[in-house]
Image (cartoon, rainbow, N blue to C red):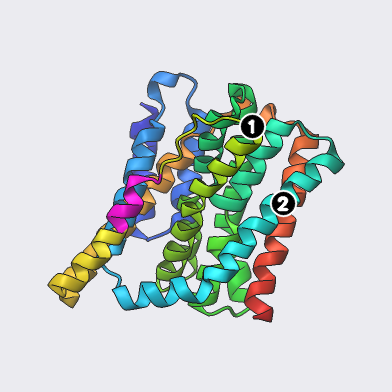
Amino acid sequence: MHLIIWLPFAFFAILINSPVFALIAGILYGMSVTSDNYRISETLASNLLQAGIVLLGLTLSVESVINISSMYFAYVSAYILVIFGIGLLLAKIFRIDAKLSFLISSGTAICGATAMVAVSQVIKSKPKELFAAVAIIFLFNIFAVIVFPSVGRLLDLSPQDFGLFAALAIHDTGSVLGAAMSFNNESLETATTVKLFRTLWLVPLILFISFLQSNKHAKPKIPLFIFMFVAAIFINAIFNLNSAVISWLSFTSNTLILAALFCIGAQIKIEQIRDINSHNFLYALTLWFFALVFSCSVIFLF
């Protein structure tokens, strides 16, 4: 019954091409559901998002992606190393539990919940610790999708600059794409390419944490959809897809991403928000502040 009520809002968000509306509608649905039987699965959200990203790859040119990757390689690498290092340092200052600091630092430096889930398998964190970290990052993502596009317009950022800013400053891939779409569809190419490059850093991060934890059995995996995204780019180059096909693929990709944002918003549970520890929240917020400063520095100084 709840889903029947809220589905029209999701379709309306797709109709008006509004990531913010899709996310908020999903959040309201998630907060209105009292039984897990009516919850939208996290797997559905992930599959929709990944399908949208792969289709987006079919609309991009190899030359453009290579140019973006080479242009921002140094900035992204420096961002990840600096933010992860600051996260561990702040954990000492805030006296944060080591496992929680690994979760939040990896989520902020690399790819939000995806990184935190992967790291949790290595450090053997408790489910409660993982849920707490994910809930905090989720709140930041909501704020970013709603507020950052307006900030980008206020600062008169170009689509490329905002795409880079979103890819660095926002934690989860879905929220990065949602913010980029809200700002300007032209931002999607830069945002997607840079964000997926950030995600690739998950492999060395897992190896590093495994070394610190003396866990030799950890097997880092690169998400399959990244390979599919790269393959899609080359398919476009090989078959030289015409503008009509690319336009249809772009629309379908946007639709899937918007549907994913609705499903992502629907994951929220009011009890998870209530259980957030204010001290841990302040730690994560401080780390995110440094991430925002770094991201702005890249945009305005280089």
Quadrant hosting residue 130: top right
- Give, as a single range, the part of the protein colored magenta: 222-229
In the picture, which quadrant includes the N terminus? top left
In this rendering, would 284 be left or right of 179? right
| Within-10-Å neighbours for mark 2: few <14, some 14–19, many 20+ | some
**Residue depicted at x 43% and y 49%:** 22
Badge 2 marks a residue whose secondary structure is helix
Distance in Å between CA atoms under marks 1 and 2? 16 Å
**Residue depicted at x 48% and y 47%:** 23
Q: Amino acid at mark 1?
A: Gln
User: Looking at the image, is 240 positioned above or below residue 217?
Assistant: below
**Residue depicted at x 13% and y 71%:** 239
Locate residue 226, reporting x and y percent: 35, 53
Quadrant hosting residue 124: top right
Q: Is residue 104 magenta?
A: no
Report the residue that reaches farthest toward the right.
93
User: Looking at the image, is 89 positioned above or below residue 156?
Assistant: above
| Residue nearest the viewer, comparing 9 with 227 | 227
| Within-10-Å neighbours for mark 1: few <14, some 14–19, many 20+ | few
The residue to which callout 2 is attached is 85
The residue to which callout 1 is attached is 213
Q: Main secondary structure of the magenta part?
A: helix
Q: Amino acid at mark 2?
A: Gly
Locate residue 37, reporting x and y percent: 39, 19
Residue 26, label in figure: none
